[in-house]
Amino acid sequence: MDVNIPAGGLFTGAGSLKTKEQYEAYGGLVNAPLDPCYHKFCDNIQNIAADVFEDMTRAAAYVIETLFEQDDLREYLENGINI
């Protein structure tokens, strides 16, 4: 994207650190990773949050469908339109 090549992705926030507000709402540790297994050996199929996986799958499907429906995909992407 930095060199004007259309790109995208989905972000769950798993690599972020827990804020004080998140700690107060959900417990855990402030400044601890939201997912302590993110990009580590324990980051595997047994460590999936099924509800988040489903949400992200639906989001990806929506993006793919939206892109598929474009009459001129190149123009759509070059205009920097966010889905």
Image (cartoon, helix red, strand yellow):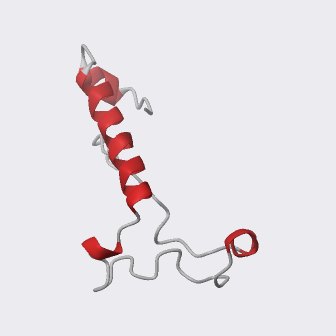
Seen in the picture, residue 24 relative to 49 is either above or below; the reply is below
**Residue 1 seen in the current view:** no
Q: Is residue 24 toward the left or the right of residue 63 in the image?
A: right
Quarter of the rendering containing residue 81: top left
Residue lying at 26% horizontally and 71% vertically, measured from the top left:
45
Coordinates of residue 7 in the picture (x, y in percent): 30, 45
Residue lying at 29% horizontally and 21% vertically, measured from the top left:
75
Quarter of the rendering containing residue 46: bottom left
Seen in the picture, residue 47 relative to 76 is either above or below; the reply is below
Coordinates of residue 53 in the picture (x, y in percent): 36, 56
Coordinates of residue 21 in the picture (x, y in percent): 75, 69
Seen in the picture, residue 38 relative to 49 is either above or below; the reply is below
Coordinates of residue 32 in the picture (x, y in percent): 58, 83
**Residue 71 seen in the current view:** yes
Q: How many marks?
A: 0
Residue lying at 65% horizontally and 85% vertically, measured from the top left:
29
- The quadrant of the image that shows the C terminus is top left
Residue lying at 76% horizontally and 73% vertically, measured from the top left:
24
Q: Residue furthest top?
A: 71
Seen in the picture, residue 2 relative to 21 is either above or below; the reply is above
